[in-house]
Amino acid sequence: MSTAKCRLMLPEQQADVTRGGTRMRLRGLVRKEFLQILRDPSSIAIAFVMPVVLLLLFGYGVSMDARHVPLAMVIEQPDADTAGLVGAFGNTEYFRPIVMPNMRSAEQAMLAGKVNGIVHLRSDFSRRLRSADGAPIQLILNGVDANYARLIQGYVQGVWGAWLNQRATQHGAPPPLAVDLQPRVWFNGNFRSRDYLVPGLIVVIMTLIGALLTALVMAREWDRGTMEALLVTPVRMREILAGKLIPYFVLGMGGMALSVAMAVWLFQVPLRGSLWVLTLASALFLAAALGMGLLISITARNQFVAGLLAIITTFLPAFILSGFIFDIGSMPLVVQWITHLMAARYFVSILQTSFLAGDVWPVLLPNAAALIVMAVIFLGLSRRLARKRLE
Amino acid sequence: MIDVAEASASATGTDIVMRLTGVDKQFGKPPRVTHALRGVEIEVRRGRITGLIGPDGAGKTTLMRIASGLLVPKRGEVEVLGFDVARKPLEIQARVGYMPQRFGLYEDLSVQENLDLYADLQGVAPQSRAARYHELMNMTGLAPFTGRLAGRLSGGMKQKLGLACTLVHPPELLLLDEPTVGVDPVSRRELWEIVYRLVREQAMTVLLSTAYLDEAERCDEVIVLHEGRQLGHGAPDDFSRPMTGRSFAVGAPDLGKRTLQARLAARPGVLDTVIQGEHVRVVLDADTATTPQSVIAELPGAGIEPVPPRFEDAFVTMIRGDQSVRRIEVSTASTAKRSDGQVIKVQHLDRRFGDFYAVRDLSFDVGHGEVFGLLGANGAGKSTTFRMLCGLLPASGGEISVAGVDLRTAAAAARARIGYMSQKFSLYGNLSVQQNLRFFASAYGLAGKRQRQRIDAALADFELQGYRDTAGETLPLGYKQRLALACALLHEPEILFLDEPTSGVDPLARREFWARISALAELGVTVLVTTHFMEEAEYCDRMAIMAAGRILALGTPEQIKAKARSAQQPGVGRETTMEDAFIALIEANEHREVQTDAA
């Protein structure tokens, strides 16, 4: 860009297509985009308010753990043994035992949703406890929420086993079980669901900014007729695309930083991996999400359709199909295949590893490679499909 | 202007800035192909203002987009400034300034920020910007508003900012797509002054599209487009000259002007009739034996005198082709009770949005069977007033009664007696004509035999039988307008509200539309209409001119023109048009405001 080329006031001076240059045009586009983000309440809401609300909601509100589960205990013949077992249930933080006089009232409490399970000790409990076969206890669970029921079942077995062991040691007898199961939980030793939900939220937040917001703002240019005015300037299509990518990349990384900071300092989630690995992986995922957002807006050209498409193809899968909440391994095979098309699943895997396990390269590298492939495909496709034409 | 024209006249063929050869453009896939342009051949000469004239759907925007490289024609060649547009769009885009219909402004950016953006995109050197901005802001009168958000500007100011952004790097060719649509007459005139200046001082070439036929006469050359076909190309005079001796003004003091027009339109050999002030302008067929005297025969007290032809006469004759004026029959038997009372009464009506008054202290009333017009630019408060009258928007203050019902207490009761047709012809695009009619009939509570009768009558009255099963969105615009009016009339309302009913429709459809409105008024239907076509005000019995939420003038068209004449310096040579009157009133109002501010 030289001064001579830019003295444009006289018509006889032939305008040069290269006047101004990419840098000037890109700077103009990026500045415009930032000004729009700052002035548009909906951008601010999606970029800053939604992440904080989601983090607080998932950090404090949503919990997949079973704590203080109300449990009915029906004891047909109370004695020292049964009292000891009730005490054992009461001593854990998992249960709140409620002693009921008979099965009928326990069943009614279950129907009314007042208890989530019934532990039934028959009248011969103490006698059979001393026999060689041991005493059976009956456990009835509310199976409406199957996962929750399984969780309770596991805890009941745990308490029961621990109580039997403890009793055996007190009586100086060998434990009734031949194998002593000593479970050790790795990576999230306290079973805190918050520790994997909060990192997983970074996926959702970056999808919001990367795909949804980008798709919406690009489609808005079509809706409001500003795209037509942009297209007839000497700007190149790649500059228009870069002019969208850069601001939303910055915004997305900002969202990531905010989420990590809240995770580590507010919710005390451990960050066992290194920060630079996390940053790099986030950048890769964001590139894929931005590519997806651009691709949607290029094909939709309409805010309503672009918004719906972005929600269905990126936002919902980031919740449901990413392994963020629902385990991918337990999905039907066909659905598992579909999850491979979602950039979110790779990033969730990286995030959970990075936060809870550390820099485990055999997990990080294949997932990062998948993100690179998706970013290249989506961004490349956007570049190919975007034309400086109206049709 | 004259200098430029003479300079160009002596120019050779190398002075062609833009050339389209055999350009065809279609949209959609068979069987639903729209032919936007068919075999268009155009040459635009350097240093001239070329007008692209035609109604909506004529192909004006498509042509502009092809010229700027946004669309590629299906067939034909397009050369702009010596470049093949299909192959070198970027070369064109670096040299051409193009203002799209919606101005291409970022509403959440300030005036200055919009300018900066386009200066960056156009590669204007930082050191030359200050001078250029200064020049543009002075030219457009936007200098005091550089810090204001573009979305907060008035329609006319937006249009000028759009133009300034297009001009931030002086283009060799300026393409303006309907720059004056929906803008008030004052802003329209100012835009034309800017365009003239650009051509005169900077030797710019301008291609401008418009649906306003009176703007044709402001161009050096005119290209007439209609339904994708090029109907003619030449100086505006070249079009109107052959019409000499065929244009007349008929006056008949004893007849109402709408009655007079209806009678004249029914005569054989009459191609066009338009109400103009006290007179009806008549264009006669060239071939028939119709003489001026035979036209006014049997009309009591009628006089006829020749008037100079204008572009619109030629245009209407051209697109009318061989179809003669049809007599409009409206069988809609209105249930309106004959009465002499006021059907609509509005007193001290206010409507606030926050601390902004959209409508302020509005008072007027409309009599039975009267056609009452609300005129004003976009944002003058017409639509807000309408919504309040239809009971769609509560008033902040004042009183409204419609058909004797107080709208504050019984809006629903009033609505059953109202027919409403909106600007956008609110129809269901994917329902057929018949289905649209049936839906609106049910919505108005018509059922069974009565519904069938009313729908059949509507199909017959509006000549929609041929389109019975056509989807609403694929109808030609003129037919959409007919269908919208048909829907609004299904329940035989006493009062008809028409919000910009003729916007974008071609002049023939507009004439037909007004003929129907006249016929309805004749039957006792009260009509309230908003429009930004100033000449349409002539069809109204009485009207109000609105600006910034207030009424500037109220009365018959003649009274308003008289008021404008007294507000302005008297003795303007030609007859005052409604547009002149409007501009004079607005200017007098601004003058008064300045004085009040000073005092």
Image (cartoon, coloured by chain):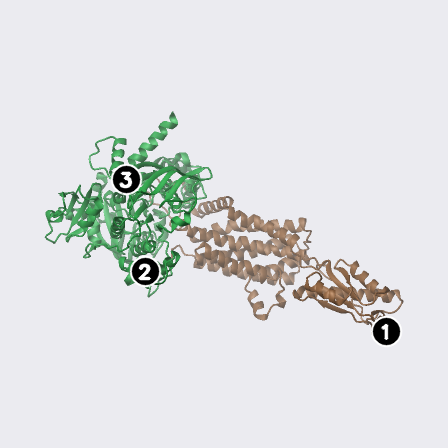
Q: Chain B is drawn in which colour?
A: green
Per the image, label 3 sits on a secondary structure element best described as helix
Q: Check whether the beta carbons of the residues at disc 3 and disc 2 lie within 8 A of each other.
A: no
Quadrant in the rendering for residue A127: bottom right
In the displayed structure, does residue B1 sit left or right of residue B448? left
Residue located beneath label 1 in the image: A131
Q: Which residue is drawn at 64% across and 63% down?
A: A362
Chain designation of label 2? B
Q: Is residue B60 visible?
A: yes
Q: Which of B133 and A171 is in front in this view?
A: A171
Gap in angstroms between the C-alphas marked 3 and 2: 51 Å
> Dividing the image into 4 quarters, which one contains the N terminus of chain B?
top left
Identified by mark 2, the residue type is: Ile
What residue did someone put label 3 on? B196
**Residue that badge 2 annotates:** B455
Q: Mark 3 vs mark 2: which is more N-terminal?
A: 3
Between the residue at mark 1 and the residue at mark 3, the CA separation in whole angstroms equals 111 Å
Foreground mark, 3 or 2, reads: 2
The quarter holding residue A63 reads: bottom right
- Dots 2, 1 in contact, CB < 8 A: no
Amino acid type at circle 1 is Ser
**Marks 3/2 same chain:** yes
- Chain A shade in the render: brown
Describe residue A232's horizontal placement relative to residue A278 as left or right. left
Outermost right residue: A172
Above or below for A66 versus B119: below
Q: Which chain carries label 3?
A: B
Question: For residue B127, which quarter of the picture?
Answer: top left
Count every numbered label the image shows and give the total.
Answer: 3
Residue A33: x %, y % from top left:
48, 47
Residue A7, relative to residue A202: is it above or below? above
Q: Residue A190 carries which label?
A: none
